[in-house]
Image: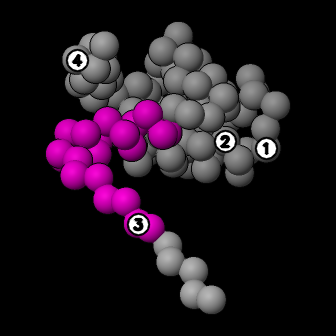
């Protein structure tokens, strides 16, 4: 007997896709902690974040990549390290979009 799989497609706008990507990035407790830390400590390097989380440096780096890819944070190269901060423009956009939902 053949199993038929149903596939659902969602017709999302570009803004809805962007918002969904940001929400998904924030859906992990470590990433929420990173966002909180960066909000309180702008312009810090990966090592600073590693010092406050119970995670290995490689794991923190992966979480930072997810947040950066979602546009929630940005990083600039500072010698051998990357200096991270919250992307204020994208956060303002995110807040506006969430406000429209509710």
Image point (71%, 51%), residue name: 58
Circles 1 and 2: CB atoms closer than 8 Å: yes
Of the numbered discs in the image, which one, if any, rests on residue 7? 3
Q: Is residue 99 magenta?
A: no
Q: Earlier in the sequence, mark 3 or mark 4?
A: 3
Which region is colored magenta?
Answer: 6-25
Residues under labels 3 and 1: Cα distance?
A: 38 Å
Decide if residue 89 is on the left or right side of residue 43. Answer: left
Dot in front, 3 or 2? 3
Q: Which residue, given by chain and number where applicable, does mark 4 sit on?
A: 100
Residues under labels 4 and 1: Cα distance?
A: 37 Å
Q: Position of residue 80 (x, y in %)?
A: 55, 49
Circles 3 and 4: CB atoms closer than 8 Å: no
How packed mark 2 is, by other alpha carbons closer than 10 Å (few <14, some 14-19, many 20 or more), is many
Q: Which residue, given by chain and number where applicable, does mark 1 sit on?
A: 56
How packed mark 1 is, by other alpha carbons closer than 10 Å (few <14, some 14-19, many 20 or more), is few
How packed mark 4 is, by other alpha carbons closer than 10 Å (few <14, some 14-19, many 20 or more), is few
Q: Which residue, given by chain and number where applicable, does mark 2 sit on?
A: 60
The secondary structure that most of the magenta stretch takes on is helix
Secondary structure at numbered mark 3 = loop
Image point (82%, 31%), residue name: 54
Q: Position of residue 81 (x, y in %)?
A: 55, 44
């Amino acid at each position: 007997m053949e199993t038929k799989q149903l596939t659902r497609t969602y017709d999302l706008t570009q803004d809805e896709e962007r918002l969904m990507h940001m929400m998904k990035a924030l859906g992990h407790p470590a990433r929420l902690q990173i966002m909180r830390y960066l909000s309180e400590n702008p312009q810090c390097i990966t090592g600073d974040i590693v010092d406050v989380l119970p995670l290995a440096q490689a794991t923190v780096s992966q979480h930072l990549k997810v947040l950066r890819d979602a546009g929630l944070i940005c990083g600039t190269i500072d010698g051998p390290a990357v200096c991270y901060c919250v992307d204020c423009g994208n956060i303002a956009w995110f807040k506006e979009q969430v406000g429209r939902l509710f």
